[in-house]
Image (cartoon, helix red, strand yellow):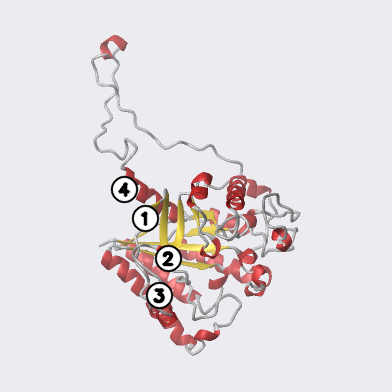
Amino acid sequence: MTGTVTISLELELGWGVTRFGMLDKISPGRERETTRLDALLDRCALSDVPITFNVVGHLLLAECDGHHEGPYPDDWWDIDPGSSVYEAPKFYAPDLVEAIRESPTPHEICTHTFSHIECAEVPEETVAHDLRTAHAAHERFGLDDVVSLVPPRHSTPPRDVLREVGIETVRVPHYRSSEFGDPRTPLHKLREIITGPHPVAEPHLVDGVVETYSPVYKTLAAEYLPLGEYDTHPAYRWIPTSVGKRLHRRYHRRALDRAVETGGHVHFWSHLYDIATDEQWPQIDALLADIGERVERGELEVKTMAELNRDVRRELEGPTTAEERPDVVELPETTAGPAEATDERPEAVERRPEVVEDRPNVADEQPTVTR
């Protein structure tokens, strides 16, 4: 059987950690994160593995004054340095997004909201405004329309808001799927993290939004190895690093095996800063190579979140273009005049996707960071 795999990587940098006093989890000047992204893009190109990069919209900016309009809490923007990518590269990263866009692999660049807002913890009008602001930032940068959202801290916004702002697919913790439930005890969760199995769960259309499921714990990176600039979490320090690496590699292999055996879908995720360590990278590099080899053998397909969304909707709604419908046959052209053609069957017109006009490449106007 042919399984499906999706990888989503959160590009949030300082926006995801500074409110919790963890800005030091990111390397000075985010140098290690920049270097790791380069290596990741190279491996993806070599193995032809596209990734969904979910980006905090503020990182698309090259600079700002730290003031942003909207119905936010009074102190919400206190963490904004109000400077530029040169002075505060943990809060501005147009160079990283440009590197993703320039990659030969067709990666998806979707949203992680504009300001890493926890969508279920604020009023709906705040969520809607923040997502619209993210859409606008993508448009100014010259990126494709945003259809996918990875909510910060797994805090899923109301579905009516998602539909209102044009979000069509969202990553959701697997225990919210009808196929799973919460781990029975903390010990069961610990066992799942260390030994698996990684959940296999098909995407579903729920209230007009396609859900793709992954664990709340990281699966592209390993929780029981060093993450970012931090040492291994105390709960896992009883596991020797060498053993942790082997467990990590086995977890990935078993997840792919299950996808192939069941014809199901697995979704790995992590943050960019989590994989910027020497302890995490070898297993991730091996995973991407393994995926590429299995794709060549016809065992796996790699889908971005946008592609999952497209496939789920096509399956439910049926083909919508003449190109996809076998019953629509394009007739040869006729030179007959209008009177002669009245008895002829009208020529079938092939419906083509709407062509979006090229947008200006705003990234070219932004300062360039030495990578």
**Residue 86 makes an appearance in the image:** no
Q: 342 above or below 11?
A: above
Which residue in the structure is indicated by mark 3? Answer: 183
State the residue in front, 123 or 346.
123
> Which of disc 2 and disc 4 is earlier in sequence?
2
Identify the residue shown where x is 36% and y is 67%.
180
Residue positioned most to the front? 123
**Residue 192 makes an appearance in the image:** yes
> Which of disc 4 and disc 3 is earlier in sequence?
3
> Which of disc 3 and disc 2 is earlier in sequence?
3
Residues at marks 2 and 3, CA–CA distance in whole angstroms:
14 Å
Which residue in the structure is indicated by mark 1? Answer: 204
Q: Quadrant of residue 74?
A: bottom right
Identify the residue shown where x is 60% and y is 79%.
230
Which amino acid, by three-letter code, is at mark 3? Answer: Pro
x, y percentage for residue 299? 29, 63
Report the disc number at residue 248. none
x, y percentage for residue 84? 73, 58
* Pointer 3 local density, CA inside 10 Å: few below 14, some 14–19, many at least 20: few
Q: How many marks?
A: 4
Which residue in the structure is indicated by mark 2? Answer: 214
Residues at marks 3 and 4, CA–CA distance in whole angstroms:
31 Å
Identify the residue shown where x is 24% and y is 18%.
344
Q: Secondary structure at mark 3?
A: loop
Which amino acid, by three-letter code, is at mark 1? Answer: His
